[in-house]
């Protein structure tokens, strides 16, 4: 469309009604990325001049008004990102009691065939080398780190930080490393000391910032086998700061002593999730898979900002793919990445109070989706996300869409496990055991024989010993989480 | 409010699965209207003369399944082949004849349990590799092998006993 006038709003990636401060922020983000001092790629200087002009016009209220008057009507559809929402019910019911409704949000590239060159990586491995890592665990970790370093593409950056009660940089973040020398440094790592995740995380973030670049996939992979004590809050704060700079975090726990709730929360701050490595020999496979997934990134992050609607609450949010994981539902929500070939699927549970049912239509959510795509120098225009449902006297007879039913049936298993855990925390072991027995029944009916047995075993363990077995809860939690993914793959095939 | 038929737990309206026992509420509106529950079954069984052709107006009814335990009659009409089984939360695909409202799960009916079809004058029953087996007059059928059956034969899907009634036999 060469004849079309450039849309300054699109160029900066802001809504037409964006306040001045948003325009300013968007301009600074883009300018930083496209500054002629930094970029040599063909055509990027022109882009820089374009955003310069766009900002000059939009930041001046008078010129902005004049410009707005010349604009054609806004095109609501994004040309880059496609999103789709399905609901568990076609309408809400006029009721005097609270009701639930589920929404499945799918976000993916508009053009499936568009093959973006895969973005260069900027990854930092943060490795726990506390005493408990001694032996198999550290050996496998070292071997994998060396393997990843050797197979790095020339454009990628891989830094390695090791920590115990202090942290040290094993491989610094830089391009064109002398690999042989650094392989040696990895090999020399010794296990000793306690686990202080904050120290490792801080050093890792410092390292990744050296080569921080919005056109790269900036990601931290934390590997640990133990609990950290007392610095959890500080870690979460670091993760929030990382998220603000588009640094993602994946946390991998080895064995059964690490704190899954904490690592979930830590990774969740950035739209990442935690993974469970039950035995040291799985380290290489899981870590290599993670690397491959990162190299397939289409968008490193999708951010959902929304205003709270009165009498409506998002009760629960869960990412079904590309990586199963619990998500925090306070705005802005870090939904997670979009991989090439794997869209982002998020399931929300809304709790609607009777007071909200005023009129014929209910606005469940009013917000916007912001996406950052590394391989695209220009910002992606945000998408308005408005979820509305009709209110009727009678429930709809229609069956819920099978994609929602499918997703919920797998999530149902995961949530039963969550309820069992909550009951254990409240010292209600009989209740927890009952949840697990129910879970076992459902697992059995879905053909998950061995997991069903594990659930029954844990139910018995809880009843008699009033605690999970060593690996029990993590086995069940991460296996039911994995079912969410396999369920979705079946559907895709 | 949705009261779970499995554990009597009160769930919020709009819930898709019971928060207590995890049972699925899929299609629960229609089930409530069919009044699931043992006491209702008995009242149904008192009128076995329920004319099946009325429910499927316009379709040719060539046979029916009489559920021995509950007295229900399920007509076979409008098509020549019916898969029998029960719906399940994990599989959105549905068999043509769904035994879940008739406690198919408790009776051990598999999701895709068996198929009954009409081929000219012959009526054929075939097990689809079910977990608890398909029995024809007391004999367990081999999976995926067709068996010719006749009017008034007794068939069991797991423990679900069914008498086959064929029109114009």
Image: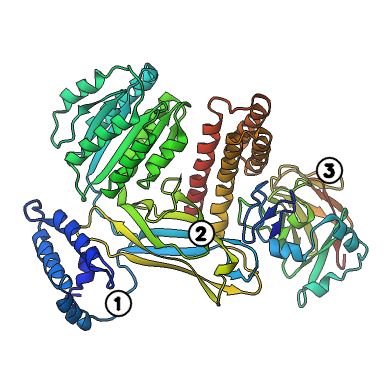
- Give the label on residue B139, or none: 3
Quarter of the image for residue A240 reads top left
For disc 2, the chain is A
**Residue B133: x %, y % from top left:** 76, 43
Which residue does the image show at 21% across and 61% down from the upper left? A26
Q: Residue furthest right?
A: B46
Q: Contact (CB < 8 A) between labels 3 and 1? A: no
The N terminus of chain A sits in image quarter: bottom left
Secondary structure category for the residue under label 2: strand
Q: Using the image, determine if residue B167 lies above or below residue A493.
A: below
The residue lying toward the viewer, choosing from A215 and A165, is A165
The residue lying toward the viewer, choosing from B22 and A114, is B22
Which residue does the image show at 71% across and 65% down from the upper left? B30
Q: Using the image, determine if residue B60 lies above or below residue A171.
A: below
**Residue A78: x %, y % from top left:** 32, 68
Q: What residue is shown with label 2?
A: A313
């Amino acid at each position: 469309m060469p004849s079309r006038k450039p849309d300054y709003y699109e160029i900066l990636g802001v809504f037409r009604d964006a306040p001045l401060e948003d325009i300013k922020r968007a301009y600074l983000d883009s300018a930083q990325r496209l500054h002629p001092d930094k970029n040599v790629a063909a055509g990027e200087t022109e882009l820089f001049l374009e955003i310069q002009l766009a900002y000059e016009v939009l930041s001046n209220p008078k010129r902005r008004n004049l410009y707005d008057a010349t604009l054609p009507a806004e095109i609501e559809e994004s040309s880059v990102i496609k999103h789709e929402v399905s609901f568990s019910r076609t309408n809400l019911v006029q009721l005097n009691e609270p009701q639930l409704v589920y929404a499945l949000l799918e976000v993916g590239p508009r053009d499936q065939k568009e093959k973006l060159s895969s973005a260069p990586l900027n990854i930092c491995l943060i490795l726990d080398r506390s005493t408990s890592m001694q032996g198999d665990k550290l050996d496998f970790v070292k071997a994998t780190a060396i393997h990843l370093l050797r197979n790095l593409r020339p454009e990628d950056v891989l830094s390695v930080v090791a920590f115990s009660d202090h942290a040290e940089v094993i491989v610094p973040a830089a391009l064109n490393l002398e690999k042989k020398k650094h392989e040696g440094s990895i090999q020399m790592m010794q296990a000793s000391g306690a686990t202080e995740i904050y120290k490792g995380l801080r050093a890792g973030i410092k390292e990744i910032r050296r080569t921080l670049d919005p056109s790269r996939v900036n990601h931290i992979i934390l590997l640990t086998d133990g609990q950290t004590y007392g610095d959890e809050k500080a870690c979460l704060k670091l993760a929030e700061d990382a998220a603000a700079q588009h640094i993602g975090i994946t946390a991998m726990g080895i064995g059964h002593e690490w704190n899954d709730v904490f690592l979930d929360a830590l990774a969740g701050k950035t739209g990442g999730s935690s993974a469970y490595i039950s035995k040291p020999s799985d380290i290489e496979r899981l870590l290599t898979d993670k690397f491959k997934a990162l190299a397939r990134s289409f968008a490193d992050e999708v951010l959902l900002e929304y205003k709270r609607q009165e009498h409506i609450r998002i009760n629960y949010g869960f990412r079904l793919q590309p990586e199963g994981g619990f998500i925090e539902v306070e705005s802005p929500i870090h939904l997670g990445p979009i991989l090439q070939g794997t869209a982002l699927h998020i399931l929300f549970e809304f709790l609607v109070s009777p007071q909200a049912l005023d009129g014929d239509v209910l606005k469940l959510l009013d917000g916007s989706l912001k996406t950052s795509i590394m391989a695209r120098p220009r910002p992606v225009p945000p998408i308005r996300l408005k979820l509305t449902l009709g209110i009727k006297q009678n429930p709809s007879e229609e069956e819920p869409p099978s994609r929602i039913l499918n997703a919920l049936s797998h999530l149902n298993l995961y949530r039963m496990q969550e309820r069992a855990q909550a009951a254990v925390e409240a010292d209600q072991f009989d209740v927890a055991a009952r949840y697990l027995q129910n879970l076992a029944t459902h697992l059995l009916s879905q053909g998950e024989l061995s997991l069903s047995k594990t659930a029954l075993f844990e139910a018995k363990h809880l009843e008699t010993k009033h605690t999970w077995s060593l690996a029990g809860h993590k086995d069940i939690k991460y296996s039911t989480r994995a079912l969410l993914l396999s369920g979705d793959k079946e559907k895709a095939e | 409010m949705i009261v779970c038929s499995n554990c009597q737990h009160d769930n919020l309206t709009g819930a898709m699965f019971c928060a207590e026992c995890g049972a699925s509420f899929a299609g629960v509106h229609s089930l409530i209207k069919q009044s699931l529950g043992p006491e209702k079954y008995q009242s149904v069984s008192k009128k076995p003369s329920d004319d099946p052709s009325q429910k499927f107006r316009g379709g040719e009814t060539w046979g029916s399944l009489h559920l021995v335990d509950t007295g229900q009659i399920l007509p076979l009409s409008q098509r020549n082949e019916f898969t029998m089984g029960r719906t399940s939360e994990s599989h959105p695909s549905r068999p043509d004849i769904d035994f879940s409202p008739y406690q198919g799960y408790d009776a051990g009916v598999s999701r895709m349990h068996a198929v009954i079809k009409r081929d000219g004058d012959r009526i054929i029953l075939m097990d689809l590799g079910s977990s608890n087996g398909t029995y024809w007059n007391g004999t367990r059928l081999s999976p995926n092998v067709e068996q010719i059956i006749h009017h008034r034969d007794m068939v069991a899907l797991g423990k679900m006993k069914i008498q086959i009634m064929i029109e114009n036999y």
